[in-house]
Amino acid sequence: MPRRVFTWYQRKRIVNLNANIIASGVLSTLLVAGLVWVLEHPLGLGWPGWGYTAFSLVADVLLDVSVFAGLHWVANHWRPLRGGSERERAALEAAAPNYYRDAAQVQGERLAISPLYYLIALALTQGLQMAEFRPYWAIMIGYVSGLLITRTLHTIMGLRSGSFVDHHKRLGVEEGAGGGVVEGEGTEVRGQGDPLRGVGKRE
């Protein structure tokens, strides 16, 4: 991933949260579809349609949560690059919330809309199998459809709750006069060549 794209991904919560959730959802769906293909063909289990549907639910939850947890840490709590401008550096250096609390809030919001997600995914998975789609194709179509619909709803929810707000905006960090960076929440100014510490504090 190019440097500027990666730092943009880390700075913009609305980007990295949606990208991480989509990536974890698509990856878990592909893995589940692959597992179902193995169960159906090489192993020849020949389960009924509801058996594959139930298996897809359990496997998808476990894989999705695990993949998202790793990607969330990379996006919001790992800072290998400093950014090319003062504004980018300020945004990247803004303190992130506690990892576990932050991830739990996002996952809690996902949990709130997960009934709709799994209703869409499982209904399409089962319905497409009844329409004589192979189980692995039914799973891919059903889960991706549910993911796209609930991503839109979660983004609206996250913007209202504040969980999708960038760290530097949450803390009140903004570009100051002369290229310096002013931090809110009672922190000090970090301006270039500014000999005064604490000047420009927000009240």
Image: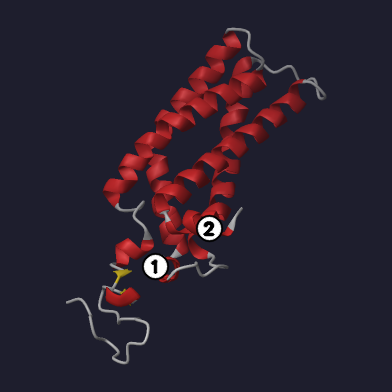
Task: Check if mark 2's residue and mark 1's residue have beta carbons within 8 Å.
Answer: no
For the image shown, how many numbered marks are present on the structure? 2
Callout 2: SS: helix
Picture coordinates of residue 90, whole percent (x, y):
40, 70
Q: Position of residue 164 (x, y in %)?
A: 36, 51
- Compared with 106, 127 (above or below) is above
User: Mark 2 is on which residue type?
Assistant: Arg
Q: Is residue 143 left or right of residue 117?
A: right
Amino acid found under the numbered disc labelled 1: Arg
Image: 84 above or below 58: below
Q: Who is closer to the viewer here, 140 or 200?
A: 200
Give above or below for 132 relative to 85.
above
Look at 37% across and 62% down and name the residue there: 167
Q: The C terminus appears in which quarter of the rendering?
A: bottom left
Q: Quadrant of the rendered structure where residue 130 is? A: top right
Identified at 36% across, 41% down, the residue is 155
Q: Seen from this angle, which residue lies furthest top?
A: 131
Q: Nearer the viewer, residue 141 or 193?
A: 193
197 shown above or below 126: below
Left or right of 49, for residue 127: left
Callout 2 crowding tier (Cα within 10 Å): few <14, some 14–19, many ≥20? few
Q: Spot the residue most to the bottom.
A: 195
Q: Which residue is mark 1?
A: 87
Quarter holding residue 125: top right
Residue on which the image places disc 2: 4
Q: Residue at x 31, y 40 (%)?
A: 156
Question: Quick one: label 1, few (<14), some, or many (20+) residues within 10 Å?
Answer: some
Q: Secondary structure at mark 1?
A: helix
Report the residue at 49% width, 25% height from top: 145
Cα–Cα gap, marks 2 and 1: 13 Å
First in sequence, mark 2 or 1: give its number.
Answer: 2
